[in-house]
Amino acid sequence: MRRRLYFLLPDVKRAREMFKGLLLARIEERHIHFLAKEGASLADLPEATLLQKSDAIHGLGVGLIVGGATGAVAGVAVLLFPPTGLFTGLGVILVTSLIGAFMGVWVSGMIAADVPNTHLTRFMPEVERGKILAIVDIPKQRMDEVMELVHRHHPGAEAHGRDPTIPAFP
């Protein structure tokens, strides 16, 4: 189980120093990401991914549920009011549910990819002023150790909370 920690850093130089310190603390590079304002260069620092910047994961889940439910309702309607000359069985509910779920995931995924991540909205005013947001995913048991390391070696880093859980795949 991993936790996501957020830190605001004053500039790219401090972000690079923190990145090197986290790597020395044996946190894998794939678990450290940075977010800067639009157009700002992060140089060689790993940038936050689309899944971290947008509400795509939440949107996919909502699309799956809403699309599947809508498909099931449509299947029940076809079962109760079958088209003339067409024999329908209970399989029509399964088929329309699957089609609805697929369509829901597809449409909501496209929409949610353009919606900013709601977890990051509280940081965006500072990021727009030029600060760098560090997003660090760490095992739950290393949280105190990493917080201590950041506070001791990177006094310019401001800890700004954590997410209780993160998706397993981003």
Image (tube, helix red, strand yellow):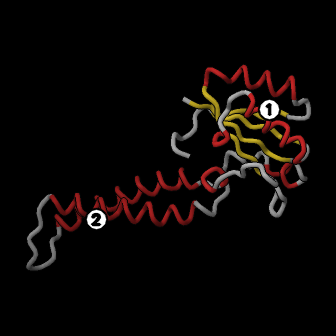
At a point 53% along the width and 51% down the height, the residue shown is 57
Looking at the figure, which quarter contains the N terminus? top right
> In front here: 126 or 24?
24
How packed mark 1 is, by other alpha carbons closer than 10 Å (few <14, some 14-19, many 20 or more), is some
Q: Earlier in the sequence, mark 1 or mark 2?
A: 1
Mark 1 vs 2: CB contact within 8 A: no
Residue sticking out furthest to the front: 24
How packed mark 2 is, by other alpha carbons closer than 10 Å (few <14, some 14-19, many 20 or more), is some
> In front here: 105 or 68?
105
Determine which residue is flagged by label 2.
74
The picture places residue 26, in percent across and down from the top left corner, at: 68, 29
At a point 72% along the width and 52% down the height, the residue shown is 47
At a point 45% along the width and 57% down the height, the residue shown is 63
Amino acid bearing label 1: Gly
Picture quadrant of residue 84: bottom left
Q: Is residue 119 above or below residue 26?
A: below
Alpha carbon of mark 1 to alpha carbon of mark 2: how far?
55 Å
Please indicate whether residue 125 sits to the left or right of residue 88 in the image: right
